[in-house]
Image: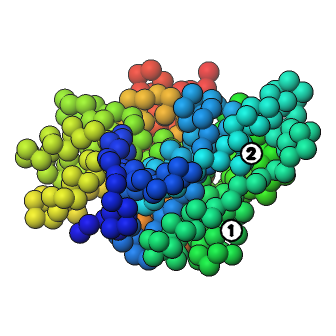
Amino acid sequence: MIPLVDTTFANWCELPTTLGTFRIYDAGNERVRIVCFGDLRAQGEQPLLRIHSSCIASELFGARDCDCADQLREAMTLIATRGSGIIFHLHQEGRGHGLSVKIRAVGKMQRENLDTVEAFESLGLQQDVRIYEDVVGLLKALGIGTVRLITNNPRKREFLEIAGIHVEMVSTRPILRADNHEYLKTKNAKLGHCLPLGDAGVNASEPILFYHSAQPWGELSNFSHHPVFLHARIWPSVEHYYQSQKFIGTLNEEAIRVAETPIQAKGRAEELGKTHLRVDWELVKEQVMLDALRAKFRQHPDLGRRLLGTGERALVEHTADDSYWGDGVDGIGKNRLGALLMQVRSELRETEQQGPYGLKGRGD
């Protein structure tokens, strides 16, 4: 099947990335770039969409005092994981004021100890003058009237809905750093964003929700890039090991082990389908996952300490895509990945309480 975007925009080229191969399209408009993964029809009538304003500082030069590059990477990860989606990358630096104004505003923030809102106010500027008419026009050209919008900015949702596009918001989870924490707090407090800003003030009894490896608590994901050593071989991630064991003892096992990314490892296993699957898979798959998780958190001591640091909080893989390993979002999923992680946590705690010879400490 020809991808939906290909039928509308003829000029494109591939973007091979660590997440898989995206495509970038010429929309005939220098203000916007279209980047797509997979066939949008795979998401039914509600494809994933990211509307992303350019940020040269973080995306090109790696600046760490905002969350722009983080959000773009997270959106790409989510889209690649789900199998399809579209990104509109817009030339709208500085919340629509342009790069020169943005440099002046950030300079005032740094030299005068202002937050982003105060800096814009001191320059006599509106806080956000971005418009999304180009996005609306392109969505209509593609025949898309309903989207799942990857954002924490209600203003984007409102703009699309006024234009007649039905929107369901999919939140991003920022990567908090000392460089960007105050900036993100200001976005929530003064610009109306709804960013989840970590565990500050969270009740210790509340569950830890995780899913994407690029999000907070992403190290709990089997897609996180932490190699494990099992059966005299190195597996680039838990996902590589898990997917390969479906075809243990065959050439397919090694083909999956050497896949470039966890997503590609999963994709190769899915391409092989059930026709090549080991006959006892349903009986052994949880043990396979448990073996890999044990190796991951024991062979990476920093991860083990992080897992122990979750205390007694429930660990929940929070996703609508999986009701077996995850919670299915509606809460009726089995959350078997979370359960196995909590088992590993208990085992690590037991080991920690033992002395150097495997004996429990006597408290003296």
Q: Residue at x 28, y 44 (%)?
A: 240
Q: Disc 1 to disc 2, how far (Cα)? A: 18 Å
> Mark 2 belongs to which amino acid?
His
Badge 1 marks a residue whose secondary structure is helix
Residue 78 percent coordinates (x, y): 46, 54
Badge 2 marks a residue whose secondary structure is loop
Is 214 in front, or is 41?
A: 41
Residue 278 percent coordinates (x, y): 12, 58
Q: Nearer the viewer, mark 1 or mark 2?
A: 2
How many marks do you count on the picture?
2
Is 297 in front, or is 359?
A: 297
Residue 184 percent coordinates (x, y): 74, 44
Is 212 in front, or is 299?
A: 212
Q: Quadrant of residue 194?
A: bottom right
In this view, 39 is above or below 143: above
Residue 156 percent coordinates (x, y): 67, 62
> Which mark, by number, is residue 159?
1
Asked if residue 117 shows in the view, the reply is yes
> Which mark, by number, is residue 97?
2
Q: Residue at x 61, y 26 (%)?
A: 363
Left or right position of 134 against 262: right
> Mark 1 belongs to which amino acid?
Phe
Q: Residue at x 36, y 40 (%)?
A: 18
Is 285 in front, or is 60?
A: 60
Q: Residue at x 72, y 48 (%)?
A: 95
